[in-house]
Image: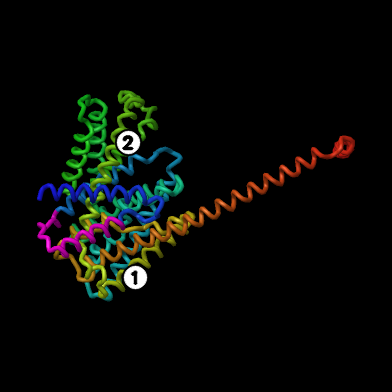
Amino acid sequence: MTATIIITFCALLLVAYLFDLTSAKSKIPSVILLLILGWVVRQTTNLFDLDLPDISSVLPVLGTVGIILIVLEGSLMLEFNRSKFGLIRQSFIGAFLPMLGLALSLGFLFSYFGGFGFKNSLANVIPLCIISSAIAIPSVSNLSKDNREFVIYESSMSDILGVLLFNFIALNKIIDLHSFGYFGLQLLIIFVVSFVATIALSVLLNEIEHHVKFVPIILLIILIYEISKLYHLPGLIFILLFGLFIGNLDELRHIRWIERFKPVEFNKEVLKFRDLTMEAAFLVRALFFLLFGYLIETSEILNADTLLWAVVIVVLIFGFRAIQLKISKIPISPLLFVAPRGLITILLFLSIDPEQSIAIVNRSLIIQVIAMTALLMMFGLMISKSTEESEAKKAKAEKEKSKEKEKATTQAEDAKPQDIKNQENEIDG
């Protein structure tokens, strides 16, 4: 039995790696293939009547570790300097305003048509308003550098702001000035914790000479995040700040005490740390979506009771996104389609208190919205890629045509008799 489990897991993860390798060419997000693969495994076990233990409790653990590693991976890839302030502002607006507008709209719709309390409706719909960095970041590897950076910033901020907004609504029984004051205090505390922890972890990363040095750093990051979570502090802010700090130490060279880190040597260690983080993020992300696909019931995908609501939610998601991109003066294509729901949506949905849950927001609705947004992103990126390729070919053809015309003109000039050339020069003179 042990050998069978090990062989199965290795085979599934190798297939997941194959999905990751081929997604750039097939334009199919690997997460869709992972969900389908997990579902197929479930149908296979049912077909052969295999009795497997209940592993649903593993899902939140994998999801939490996954979101930590994904945000860390994304923040390590970002450049942070004055030239990026405009992009950061656009990303913040792109993450926050559509989320807030969508949450208020859906909260009103659920409370009006479903008869649920507005606060409970709001707590239930916020998970559906968050862009999943776990799906968005790997899916835009073929886009331009500017678009990739925007998606990394936007989806990471969407995760962080979404968790902040969810905790604020879900954990406060009454929304008043006291709750806003307490929320402000939480932000202040996490910024102080982030500063101290970032410096301490950076020193450890720089000073540890043992052959095992990166795993303890990742374990400490997870530990700090979980402790902050116990006190309802937004730990993802710490992860984002830590990744930005160690990934952009060169930008802080003018600060005297930064020289103690020996930035040139430190950057080499950061590159190794980033590589390890990327590999670990892939492993955990693949396991999470495989397991989630395995736990999906066919009846949940085809549930007609939630399908209409799922369509309404998806229409509103892309409607608000189109408005936001238009206001921010960002080209709508292909970024319009990059608004998938995924890992963070599932995690927050699973963490909703049973007393606050509403009947409309159930597993079927979550699965349908995730599937629809992922599929629309897939088709949107395919269409955008085809358009970009055709435009690139057209531009290349025009450029070659222009070169040929210029070459023909030059040859014609060279073919003229010398006395005609002299006359033309005299006229020009």
Q: Distance between the residues labelled 1 and 2?
A: 40 Å
Task: Report the residue marked by disc 1.
Answer: 312
* Residue found at x 21% / y 60%: 349
Which of the numbered marks, if any, corresponds to residue 7? Answer: none
Q: In this view, does 77 lie above or below 95?
A: above
| Residue 178 seen in render | no
Which image quarter: residue 290?
bottom left
Residue at image mark 2: 245
Q: What residue type is labelled 1?
A: Val
Quarter of the image for the C terminus: give it: top right
Q: Is mark 2 on a helix, strand or loop?
A: helix
* Label 2 CA crowd tier, 10 Å (few <14, some 14–19, many 20+): many
Q: Where is residue 209? Give x, y as percent.
A: 22, 24
Residue 50 located within the stretch drawn in magenta: yes
Give the residue at x 30% y 33%.
272
Q: Is residue 244 left or right of residue 213?
A: right
Task: State the extent of the magenta-drawn residues as a range.
Answer: 32-57
> Where residue 73 appears, x then y in whole percent?
31, 42
Q: What element does badge 1 sit on? A: helix
Residue 84 vs residue 255, the one in the foreground: 84
Percent of width and height locating residue 406? 71, 44
**Residue 186 pos. (x, y %):** 22, 47
Taking depth in this image into account, of 15 and 393 the one nearest to the observer is 15
Q: How many marks?
A: 2
Give the label, 1 or 2, closer to the camera.
1
